[in-house]
C-alpha cells in the first residue's frame, strides 16, 4: 500500500510539472498567436496585408517575443529574485536575527566573552604544551603530552567572535557570511592559491 501510494504521489508530481511547465506553456503560446491573428490581424486589412498568413504572424511574433522574454527574465533574475529571497528569509522564523533587548544587550556580548575565554584557554594550553615539551627534553621522565590547538581553531573562534559581534549590531547573517566569503577569497588571492 505504501509503495503504491508513493508511486502515485510521484506520478502526480510528474504530471503537474509536465503540465504546468511545458504543455500549458506551449498551448498558451500557440493560443495567443491564434487569438491575436484571428481577432486583431484578420479584422484589419492593413495588418492582414503585412501578415498574410498565421504562419508569418507566428514567426514575426516569435522573433520579437523570445528576445523580449529573455531580457525581461534576465532583469527579473537580477533585480526581483534577490528582493523576493530577502523578504522570504525575513519571514522565515528559522533564519537567525538577534532580538532587541536582553539577547542583544546581554546574550550576544556574553557569547563574545565566552569565545574570547575559549581562545585564551587554547593559547594557555598551547603554552603549557610548549613548557612540558621543554621539561621533557631536559629529563628522562616520561611526561604525557598535552594536545595542541592548531591555527585553524583560532581562526574559527575569531570568525565566531566576528559573526556574533555583527549579529549583535543587527546585521543580517547572510550579509555577514557573504562578507566572510569575500574576505576568504581575498586572502586566498593574496596567498596565491
Image: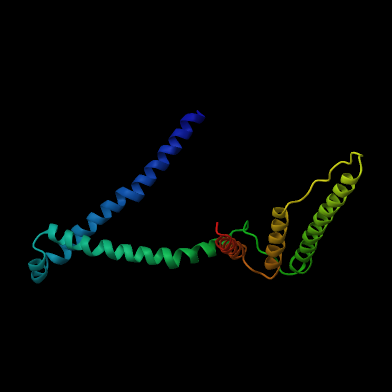
Identified at 64% across, 68% down, the residue is 171
Residue most extreme to the top:
1
Where is residue 134? Give x, y as percent.
Answer: 87, 49
Q: Is residue 156 above or below residue 68?
A: above
Q: Quadrant of residue 100?
A: bottom right
Q: 167 or 16: which is nearer to us?
A: 167
Identified at 53% across, 64% down, the residue is 86
Where is residue 172? Give x, y as percent.
Answer: 62, 66
156 horizontally vs 70: left or right: right
Q: 91 or 167: which is nearer to us?
A: 167
Identified at 77% across, 69% down, the residue is 105
Where is residue 33? Give x, y as percent.
Answer: 20, 59
141 horizontally vs 70: left or right: right
Residue most extreme to the front:
138
Q: How was this image coloured? A: rainbow
- Numbered marks: total: 0
Image quadrant occupied by the C terminus? bottom right
Identified at 61% across, 62% down, the residue is 180
Q: 98 or 110: which is nearer to us?
A: 110
Q: Quadrant of residue 32?
A: bottom left
156 horizontally vs 25: left or right: right
141 horizontally vs 62: left or right: right
Where is residue 169? Give x, y as percent.
Answer: 69, 71
Q: Is residue 134 above or below residue 73?
A: above
Amino acid at each position: 500500500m505504501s509503495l503504491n501510494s508513493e508511486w502515485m504521489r510521484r506520478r502526480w508530481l510528474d504530471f503537474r510539472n509536465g503540465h504546468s511547465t511545458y504543455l500549458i506553456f506551449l498551448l498558451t503560446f500557440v493560443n495567443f498567436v491564434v487569438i491575436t491573428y484571428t481577432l486583431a490581424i484578420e479584422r484589419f486589412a492593413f495588418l492582414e496585408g503585412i501578415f498574410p498568413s498565421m504562419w508569418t504572424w507566428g514567426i514575426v511574433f516569435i522573433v520579437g517575443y523570445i528576445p523580449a522574454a529573455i531580457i525581461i527574465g534576465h532583469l527579473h533574475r537580477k533585480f526581483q529574485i534577490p528582493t523576493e529571497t530577502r523578504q522570504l528569509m525575513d519571514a522565515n522564523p528559522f533564519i537567525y536575527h538577534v532580538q532587541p533587548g536582553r539577547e542583544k544587550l546581554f546574550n550576544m556580548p556574553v557569547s563574545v566573552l565566552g569565545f574570547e575565554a575559549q581562545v585564551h584557554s587554547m593559547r594557555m594550553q598551547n603554552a603549557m604544551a610548549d613548557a612540558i615539551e621543554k621539561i621533557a627534553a631536559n629529563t628522562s621522565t616520561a611526561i604525557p603530552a598535552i594536545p595542541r590547538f592548531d591555527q585553524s581553531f583560532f581562526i574559527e573562534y575569531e570568525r565566531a567572535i566576528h559573526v556574533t559581534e555583527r549579529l549583535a549590531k543587527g546585521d543580517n547573517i547572510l550579509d555577514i557570511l557573504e562578507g566572510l566569503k569575500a574576505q576568504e577569497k581575498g586572502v586566498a588571492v593574496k596567498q596565491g592559491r
